[in-house]
Amino acid sequence: MAYLFDIFLIAIGAALINNFVFYYFVGICPFIGVSRKVDMAVGMGSAVTFVMIIAVFISWTITSLILVPGAPVSSWVAGFFISSEQAANINLTILAYIVYIFSISSSVQFVEMYMRKFYPPLYKSFGVFLPLITTNCAILFACLTVMSKIVGVENPAEVWDLGRALALGLFGGVGFTIAIVIMAGIREELDLCDIPVPFKGAAITLIIGGILAMAFMGFTGVDSGIRTALM
């Protein structure tokens, strides 16, 4: 029961309370660039969510099995060349950024090939923004968040397992989708409004994004309130 409660808190935290876009301000490039139409926003949000889940899965697996000190794979390989005591202390977390970027780019390539094959209109509508998912810092941020819950955690009981990592990836993507769809709906309505020339384009979009961020601040403390009420 406690495990499911942790998953629930991670889910609402990633999707609403600590929304990647409105709380941490990551993933702003696609948030601004692909939020002109709701259908495109839904497609981009779905693609980002899918890529984020795959990237988090790969990053958690590699971090747990290879990168952290005492990881089974790295210790086993190093055991052929050095003593077992030295092999258990090998720390490869310095390679985390390279590994995560590689996993993200591989996931994006898979999504791009899949969409080109089965959804050509959606693939064409994305244009250059689909390859830009590779540089979407929201996905890298999710991978680094998972790493922070594995590396350097003193209490072994607090180390995230794969279920918690996947929950962050899934609902982090859901939160990104919520943010970009809300913005797309507002921008569609803005096409019917008489916006002053200095505020047209990215300016009014950033202003609305700031207002939405302040609105999402209303969720602050919901997780601690739920924790207090149920525990």
Image (cartoon, rainbow, N blue to C red):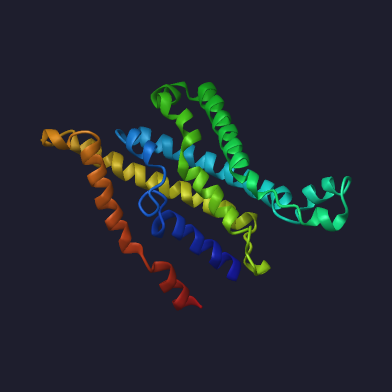
Q: In this orientation, which residue lies closer to the viewer: 198 or 182?
A: 198
Front residue of this view, candidates 224 and 200:
200
Q: Residue at x 65, y 49 (%)?
A: 93
Q: Is residue 219 above or below residue 178?
A: below
Query: Of residues 32 and 54, which is closer to you in this image?
Result: 32
| 2 versus 10 height, above or below | below
Residue 204: x %, y % from top left:
21, 40
Q: Does residue 110 lie above or below 223 as drawn?
A: above
Residue 88 is left or right of residue 95, and the answer is: right
Give how far across and how far down residue 39 sits, in percent: 35, 34
Whether residue 189 is visible to the viewer of this picture, yes or no, is: yes
- Report x, y in % for residue 213: 30, 53
Circle count: 0
**Image quadrant in which you'd find residue 43:** top left
- At horizontal 83% and vertical 47% (from top left) the residue drawn is 78
151 horizontally vs 18: left or right = right
Q: Is residue 48 above or below residue 22?
A: above
Q: Quadrant of the N terminus?
A: bottom right
Residue 1 visible in the shown view: no
Relative to 19, 77 lies left or right: right
At which x and y percent is residue 166?
58, 51
User: Residue, x 56% and y 28% (percent of image)?
Assistant: 109
